[in-house]
Every structure is written in C-alpha cells, then in structure tokens.
Image (cartoon, grey):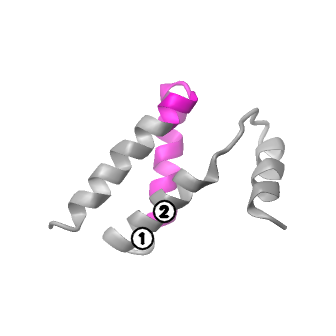
Amino acid sequence: MSLSSWSQQLSDALGLDLEVDVDPILDLARDAAHQVERPAAPLTTFLVGYAAGMRGGSVDDIADCIDIALDLAANQADV
C-alpha cells in the first residue's frame, strides 16, 4: 500500500476531510529524529497535529505548527 493510499484511508476512517501533504510531515519527523532523538519523531508529529487542530486545523495552521517545530528541532543541534 502506498503512503498516499494509507493517508487517505486513515483520514477517512478517522472522519477527517483533509488532503494531507505528507512530505512536510515526513521532513518534520526526520528532523526531529535526527536533531533530538529517534522517539521524538512520532511525538513531534502528534503534538504538531494536535496543536494545529486546536488552532482550527487549516492548512495554514498546520504549516505554522510545522515551522515552529522545525525551528525548535534545528536549535537542538546547537545545544
């Protein structure tokens, strides 16, 4: 099964009317795993999704939350 198919099936099963752009999410997971530690990837993507949903869940809300998390993860490389 492709990632796109899985994303659509899971969104449908969860009752979400959402077109998911998986690339930014995968980039975020990769950066969190490499710049923080591996288990940070699923935790980071969950928290970003939750925060975006609390803000309203728009495409802009998702992008803003991803940007916040990416900036924070990038700063971990300096610590």
What secondary structure is the magenta-colored segment mainly? helix
Q: Residues within 10 Å of mark 2 (few under 14, many from 20)?
A: many
Specify the segment rendered in magenta: 40-62
Residue 59 at x, y = what percent?
A: 56, 31
Task: Give the answer, above or below, for where 35 lies relative to 49.
Answer: below
- As drawn, the label of residue 68 is none
Looking at the image, residue 75 sits to the left or right of residue 67; the answer is: left
Residue to which mark 2 is pinned: 29
Q: Is residue 52 magenta?
A: yes
Looking at the image, residue 16 sits to the left or right of residue 54; the answer is: right
Residue drawn at x 55%, y 60% is 26
Residue drawn at x 28%, y 52% is 72
Secondary structure at badge 1 equals helix
Residue to which mark 1 is pinned: 33
Task: Give the answer, above or below, for where 68 lies relative to 52.
Answer: below
Q: Report if the CB atoms under discs 2 and 1 are less than 8 Å apart.
A: yes
Quarter of the image that includes the N terminus: bottom right
Q: Is residue 24 visible?
A: yes
Task: Give the answer, above or below, for where 47 lies relative to 38.
Answer: above
